[in-house]
């Protein structure tokens, strides 16, 4: 059954920060309360008008207008549509970065919401629906609210804050660059932050829960193509040719031993998966060639490099043993997302205080990938998950991120704002 919500008129709070709130945490609490309804309004607008990777033009304008209204100096057009603003605190101190990703997915929404997306676009030559099926609309709204809250207490901040609204986390269109890697390439960290924080909403946790872990959190992701060339012949006389189908099957089985027998499974898990095999047109024709595509997932950068080398060597030598030829092309994707251990230990008490110790979950290793990983290679980073499945519902069976039925409970947004802003305040202390 599709989830329904009732939309009531939302009053935008114009509450000012009380003069008596001299303690920075008290001021922050008041500032966060003043944006508690705005964040919902912003999220609904962004959800209703999603845009695909590297095409977040209207979303970028929406964010830019808000940041400029706060009096911040804003840079636009970074990595195509990225938006960056810097807040100067009232006291000298470190620079902290906060990141939100802006892009949506080529998914047709099936959730029954008054603000459901009706947008369409073109993806790989096909007309598709567009939906914030991964929840990036929540990330953008949360960071917009965090920016406003921190501006309201800027005189009390012992340092500066960099707000990073990033395009194309889901991957740039074919033939284009994008995302975190391109933002860094174009000078995002000209002044390198002392730390960077990011969050991601997830249906696997309930509203009120926050999940994270020290060290490796999310896997690297590298896709590969293996082209196996044989010699075409009649299916009744395979000895007159070289069978690339048999060679391909042997390559598939041989490469599975990389993860199970050739790398140290006690150090970190790894996965090599094949997603498609294409070759041949008839039952009685052994084809000239076969193409296979797949993905490599690891949780260790050195192991990642080792597995790539082993995949190439294994495919080439197995093919050669049968008289065929294999050529391997690897598209180097996102690195391992690693939470800096010292930073995570330092900031874990903050998240426990904001969410409550009973609501802190140690996240298992996740074989999905995130380009927040690029930032964390440059400076200490901490990435955490914000539960958005309504309390009382089973988060295990809830539609997952990337599903057309993905649903985010708006009651979770405020915890997102509170956690991000409190991380900044406590780090700068």
Image: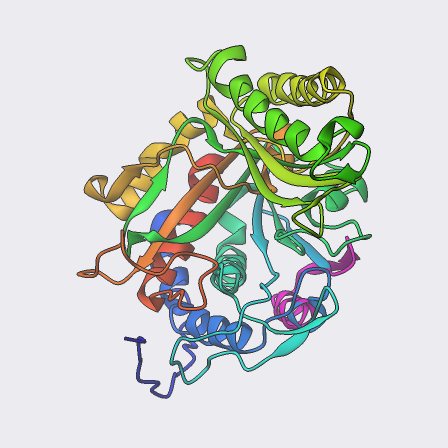
Identify which residue is drawn at 67% across, 35% down: 245
Q: Position of residue 343 (x, y in %)?
A: 47, 27
Tell me how the rendering is colored. Answer: rainbow
Identify which residue is drawn at 37% across, 51% down: 386
Q: Is residue 175 above or below residue 393?
A: above
Viewer-proximal residue, 295 or 3? 295
Viewer-proximal residue, 318 or 152? 318
Which image quarter is the C terminus in?
top left
Identify which residue is drawn at 74% across, 26% down: 239
Q: Is residue 68 magenta?
A: yes
Residue that extends furthest to the bottom in the rendered view of this protein: 9
- Please state if 28 lies on the left or on the right of 379 as rendered: left
Q: Is residue 388 above or below residue 194?
A: below
Residue that extends furthest to the front in the rendered view of this protein: 236
Q: In the picture, residue 304 is in which quadrant?
A: top right
Q: Is residue 163 above or below residue 110?
A: above
- Please state if 78 lies on the left or on the right of 202 as rendered: right
Q: Is residue 406 above or below residue 385?
A: below
Give the magenta range: 60-81
Viewer-proximal residue, 225 or 405? 225
Identify which residue is drawn at 71% across, 57% down: 82
Q: Position of residue 242 (x, y in %)?
A: 77, 28
Q: Position of residue 192 (x, y in %)?
A: 69, 34
């Amino acid at each position: 059954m599709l989830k329904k919500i009732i939309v009531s008129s939302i009053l935008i709070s114009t509450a000012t920060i009380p003069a008596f709130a001299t303690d920075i945490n008290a001021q922050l609490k008041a500032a966060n309360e003043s944006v508690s309804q705005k964040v919902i309004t912003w999220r609904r607008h962004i959800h209703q008008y999603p845009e695909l990777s590297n095409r977040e033009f209207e979303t970028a304008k929406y964010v830019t207008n808000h940041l400029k209204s706060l009096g911040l100096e804003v840079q636009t057009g970074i990595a195509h549509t990225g938006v960056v603003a810097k807040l100067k605190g009232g006291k000298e101190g470190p620079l902290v970065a906060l990141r939100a990703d802006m892009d949506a997915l080529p998914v047709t929404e099936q959730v029954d919401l008054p603000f459901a997306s009706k947008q369409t676009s073109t993806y790989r030559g096909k007309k598709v629906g567009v939906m914030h099926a991964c929840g990036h609309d929540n990330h953008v709204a949360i960071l917009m609210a965090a920016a406003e809250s921190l501006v309201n207490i800027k005189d009390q901040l012992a340092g500066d804050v960099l707000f990073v609204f990033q395009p194309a986390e889901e991957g740039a269109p074919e033939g284009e660059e994008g995302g975190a890697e391109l933002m860094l390439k174009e000078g995002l960290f000209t002044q390198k932050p002392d730390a960077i924080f990011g969050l991601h909403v997830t249906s696997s946790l309930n509203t009120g829960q926050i999940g994270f872990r020290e060290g490796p959190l999310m896997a690297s992701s590298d896709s590969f193509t293996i082209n196996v060339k044989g010699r075409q012949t009649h299916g009744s006389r395979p000895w007159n040719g070289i069978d690339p189908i048999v060679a391909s099957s042997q390559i598939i089985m041989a490469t599975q031993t990389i993860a199970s027998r050739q790398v140290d499974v006690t150090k970190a898990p790894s996965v090599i998966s094949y997603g498609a095999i294409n070759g041949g047109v008839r039952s009685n024709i052994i084809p000239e060639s076969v193409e296979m595509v797949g993905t490599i997932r690891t949780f260790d950068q050195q192991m990642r490099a080792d597995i790539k080398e082993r995949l190439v060597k294994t495919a080439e030598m197995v093919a050669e043993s049968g008289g065929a030829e294999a050529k391997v092309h690897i598209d180097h994707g996102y690195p391992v997302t690693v939470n800096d251990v010292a930073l995570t230990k330092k900031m874990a008490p903050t998240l426990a205080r904001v969410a409550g110790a009973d609501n802190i979950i140690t996240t298992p290793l996740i074989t999905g990938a995130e380009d927040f990983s690029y930032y964390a290679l440059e400076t200490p980073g901490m990435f955490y998950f914000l539960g958005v499945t309504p309390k009382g519902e089973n988060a295990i069976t809830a539609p997952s991120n990337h599903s057309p039925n993905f649903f985010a409970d708006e009651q979770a947004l405020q915890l997102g704002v509170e956690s991000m802003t409190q991380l900044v305040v406590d780090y700068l202390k």
